[in-house]
Image (tube, helix red, strand yellow):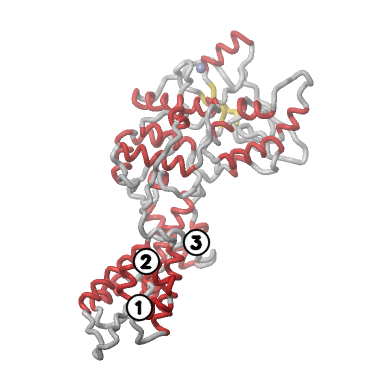
Amino acid sequence: MHICLDRTGFNTTSIFFPQYLQRLRKNLPPYSNVTVSELIWNHTMFPFYTAFLSQERSDSIHGMMVDGCGKSIENSLGFSGGKVKPYNRLRYCPKCYAEDMDEFGESFWRRLHQVPDVLYCPKHGVSLKSTIVPSTEKYADYWCADSDVCNTEVEDDIYDERIKELNQAYIRNAMFLMSGDYKKKELHHIVDFYVDRLRERGFASARGFIYVQDFVDEFLRFYPSDYLSLMQSDVNVNQKANWLRLFVRNNGKNRSPLRHLLVLQFLGVSAEEFFHEQTTTGKIMARVNHAPSFDLEQRRKAWLKIIEENPGLNRSQLKEIGKGLHTWIYKHDRDWYEQVTPRIHKRKKRTPVIDWAKRDEECLALAKQAVESILNREGKPIRVLPATIRQEVGVRRWLDNPKLVRTRRFIQQVTEDINSYRIRKIKWAISELESEGLSVTVYKIQLRAGFGGNNKEMSELVARVMQGIYK
Ligand SMILES: [Zn+2]
């Protein structure tokens, strides 16, 4: 598997993801009929690391290996910042090595033994051993699998039976990925597949809402914690954004193949079964009120404008003015329509008596809904304030009325002080960085949260929040 390329004017070499293979191919003897694709699929770590990536992304990495890209593919796969790291030394099986020496008089490095957290040789069942040969070396250097770095002594197995059994199932899956015998799935299909299996096991509702806590608890019952540590996948139950919680969310973030295999194994599905299953249901979207909220907001604004610009008109007159708009709002946003649209009966001189208690209740419900949607919003958090609540609800006129006692009290209670808001932003920034597989540092958090890099007060706050999270 070990392709070492010595290139001029280019100093990134890689054992796992060699580049410029087209050039290498051209320099092979004319009678050699090995193709560049064969080199990539049969002799590099490509099939393992790209198995769960989209077709587009895999193709792009394939292209970098064929033609070279001048930068490290490991970095673009998130190796350096990622939570799951490859071994930084090449590994081997002492029995394979002994057999090779007997049969061929020389040995070679096997790809499967370099897959992260493969602990055993599947052929001999013995523990793999590490060498002094760096796998992440920046300089091209040729290391033969010979007696300088390998030997035939079998080491004692230090793990208990359960760990061995779990790891052997993982190895079988890793072997399947290495075979490259799979059809690509896009990430949202993968997540849908997980949701389907979780639903079958009672960890998700019919509509696909995942009971995350139950899922996490069961996962931790299935895998002993020392095995998860060994697999570089500790699950911190106190951490809201631990990898497992993020893993089953449809967030488009990169996930380590090792962790896909851990989740599949927990679900009782082999990698082979996974890649051959083609139908998924996933989350079932609610059919009502499906219009994008941006549209909804715009329509509400337009309707309010009609009301404001035409005081004294009754509903059917307003309807005449905003015809299509009225139809849409009446159909899709009826509750809101009822609340904001005045009822004016032409012949009555009295202004209608407003039932403030009832309206208070309605407004309270709207405000609660608004707060929830502000807090659950994707992307950078926005602060919960009377103004942002009003904006979210789309009602300007009534929410501030002193007669709406409960609504006003609610808004007062949920209004975020600046410090809580900053803490929420920091936690958000941490979970973003984590889910992107980046290292989490005070400085990066500051930038992501939008505090700028030079604010000392903020960096102290970030450090305090991190201590709370990573204790
Ligand atoms: Zn072996």
Residue at 76% from the left image edge and 24% from the top image edge: 28
Residue type at mark 3? Gln
- Find residue 154 and report its horizontal and vertical position in percent: 48, 16
Residue type at mark 2? Ser
Q: Is residue 70 left or right of residue 119?
A: right
Is residue 266 in view from this perspective? yes
- Where residue 446 is drawn, which disc sits there? 3
Mark 2 / mark 3, whichever is N-terminal: 2
Residue type at mark 1? Ser
Residue at 50% from the left image edge and 26% from the top image edge: 176
Mark 1 / mark 2, whichever is N-terminal: 1
Of all residues, the one furthest to the top in this rendering is: 102
Residue at 39% from the left image edge and 72% from the top image edge: 326
Task: Check the image and report above or below for 262 versus 378.
Answer: above
The residue singled out by tag 1 in the image is: 316
Q: Are marks 1 and 2 in contact (CB under 8 Å)?
A: no
Task: Check the image and report above or below for 467 versus 184.
Answer: below
Front residue of 77/312: it is 312
Mark 1 / mark 3, whichever is N-terminal: 1
